[in-house]
Image (spheres, helix red, strand yellow):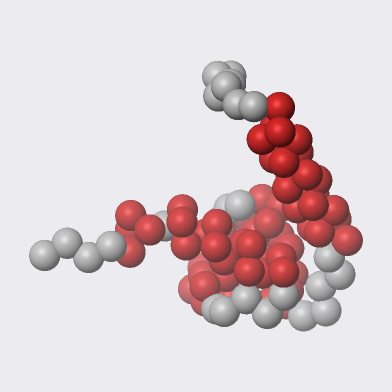
């Protein structure tokens, strides 16, 4: 593993952000299939794994993730997914 050199303050800030994310995911209590999809994506970061686990279609998972975030975790998951798939969504003429 290659470590990027950073300042101590930046490292502490990253730890705080990561700890916030971990706490948010672990305390998330899904009340619907959409929230369950969001939580599973936050844990696995894999649409195909969610499809297998929850027996839902690929399109349903993508639709839920790309829908406007309704809570903090959904907003974080959507933001990460949009960054991850930006190259596939860009139009080249």
- Quick check: 54 above or below 80? below
* Residue shown at 46% from the left, 56% from the top: 83
- The answer to whether residue 76 is visible is yes
Q: Residue at x 77, y 80 (%)?
A: 32
Where residue 57 sits: x, y (%)? 55, 72
Percent coordinates x, y for residue 49 in the rendering: 62, 54
- Quarter holding residue 60: bottom right
Residue at image point 28% right, 62% down: 90
Q: Residue furthest left?
A: 93
Question: Which residue is more in the foreground, 78 or 12?
Answer: 12
Name the spot of residue 78 as percent of width and height, x first.
57, 66
Looking at the image, is 30 positioned above or below residue 80?
below
Q: How many marks?
A: 0
Judging depth in this view, the residue of 41 and 78 nearest the camera is 78
Q: Quadrant of the C terminus?
A: bottom left
State left or right for residue 64 relative to residue 31. left
- Seen from the viewer's position, the closer of residues 48 and 66 is 66
Name the residue at 17% across, 62% down. 92
Q: Is residue 15 left or right of residue 74?
A: right
Quadrant where the N terminus sits is top right
User: Can see residue 61?
Assistant: no
């Amino acid at each position: 593993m290659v470590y990027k050199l950073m300042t101590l303050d930046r490292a502490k800030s990253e730890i705080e952000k990561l700890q916030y994310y971990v706490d948010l995911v672990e305390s998330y209590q899904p009340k619907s299939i959409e929230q369950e999809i969001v939580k599973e994506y936050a844990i696995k970061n894999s649409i195909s794994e969610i499809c297998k686990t929850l027996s839902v279609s690929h399109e349903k998972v993508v639709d839920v993730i790309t829908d406007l975030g309704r809570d903090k975790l959904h907003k974080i998951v959507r933001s990460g997914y949009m960054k991850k798939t930006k190259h596939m969504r860009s139009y080249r003429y």
